[in-house]
Amino acid sequence: MNFDDTIVAIATANGIGSISIVRVSGSKALEIAQKISQKTSIKPRYATLSYLYNINNDLIDEALILYFKAPFSFTGEDIVEFQCHGGIAVSNLIVDTVLAYGARIAHAGEFSKRAFLNNKMDLSKAEAISKIIEARSEDSVKLLARQLKGELKDFVEDIREDLLFMLAYTEVTIDYAEDDLPSDIFQKIEEKISKIEEKLQNTLDASRRREGMIEGFKVAIIGKPNVGKSSLLNKLLNYDRAIISDIAGTTRDTIEESVRIGTHIIKIVDTAGIRENTSDIIEQIGIEKSIKALSEADIVIALFDNSKVIDAEDKKIIELLNASINKKIVKVLNKCDLDNSFDKSILNDYIELSTKENINLLIKRIENILDENTSSDELTLVSKRQISSVNNTLENIVLAKNPLYSGELEFFAHYITEALHEISQITRPYENDEMLDVMFGEFCLGK
């Protein structure tokens, strides 16, 4: 990929709208804008209203031109934005004209990649930009906005600084053992190790609790056949998405839909009825998928039939619920408009309702659970890549403790270096010169 090229792309979504933005970045951006607008100069950071012409001098549109002079732009290069009238035809004509004057079509993500390579953003900010475009809830937008502001970058930089401190002092101790070093240095290192371990663990725990926040929490509806799962799904969606009948096994596959509850978008999964014995191969596959959906869900709604005596299938559901750890489970006794035959004593903390009537109590319970998982001020990692980097950093920190206590400083330095590489994957790669700068700058050993 040649970053000396000038690139162009439509920055707004396809379709018809009031405004469409065509963005150009690179050394020829201003020159091309002057040719298209037929202006001899364009003032940086001002909106300039201008007619736009193609290479044959035909009028394309009247539009606003915004020029951002390097390095004060998103990519760190000269950028020109044409804000033209919305529609595919107009913006495509502008792109074709920019191409005719020597630019090329940008690759996917190339504007952000240039911004990263020109030190205008780190990887955490680039990832936040990508995620915020796809955000499906108000809470995820707020969280990602905090990363755009640099919260994750500051978190990583604090840990990098402490790790560099430990690595630099360790290398000094190994290479300059005869020199006088602060007597409390290893006490300080132990304190920093403990502090980093706690910060990393807390961040991982908070992130795993809210892992579904960006893409939507997954809610699975489970229960035996004919307990009212499909009726509940239809009620939540406010339309008949699932087929309802009195025949057991009507729903044979999982049905997944998205629905808004409060400020949250959730993925809700209606599953096939779970029962122990069935001769129908297709139904058995559906049951296996239901159990898988239960294992993957963040929240489980377990339905029981108030009008039926508890049976082996109900007990199987309760057994599966008891085996599900780290999940929020909402037990619902459905069909409470009918006479009670179910032994309520076997359930605890359950909701009584009828899916034929009002389910507001259930909706409120789900909303409260979602609020609990999104309202914290704790730092949250927003991707599996970030979680993996923090987890690997923590593993190396834990491995570094024994060599530190036993005086095997070469092994300690190895694990700290690995931790530095891992945590740096979130923002910017670690370079060995950073450790050398600390060594020779802080300790004055380069004499």
Image: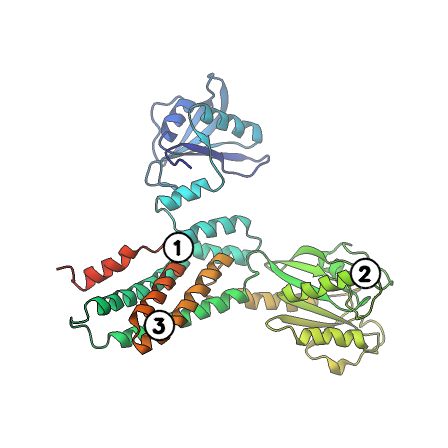
- Tell me which amino acid carries mark 3: Ile
Across and down, in percent, residue 221 comes to 71, 65
Label disc, if present, on residue 427 of the rendered structure: 1
The spot of residue 118 in percent (x, y) is: 35, 43
Observer-side mark, 3 or 2, equals 2
Q: CA distance from mark 3 to mark 1?
A: 21 Å
**Residue 181: x percent and y percent?**
19, 72
Considering only order in the chain, which callout, 1 or 2, is on the residue closer to the N terminus? Answer: 2
Helix, strand or loop for disc 3: helix
Residue 6 placement, left or right of 249: left
The amino acid pointed to by label 1 is Thr
| Outermost bottom residue | 345
Disc 2/disc 1 C-alpha distance (Å) = 50 Å
Q: Residue at x 39, y 56 (%)?
A: 150
Question: Quadrant of the rendered structure where residue 315 is?
Answer: bottom right
Q: Which mark is residue 193?
A: 3
Residue 376 shows in this picture: no
Secondary structure under badge 1?
A: loop
**Comparing marks 2 and 1, which lies closer to the viewer?**
2
| On-image quarter of the N terminus | top left
Identify the residue under disc 2: 281
Give the secondary structure at mark 2: helix
Which three-letter amino acid code belongs to the residue tagged 2?
A: Ile
Location of residue 70 by image quarter:
top left
Q: CA distance from mark 3 to mark 2?
A: 55 Å
The structure residue drawn at horizontal position 59% and vertical position 34%, both measured from the top left corner, is 16
Q: Residues within 10 Å of mark 2 (few under 14, many from 20)?
A: few
> Which residue lies at the image location 20% right of the left edge and 74% below the top edge?
182
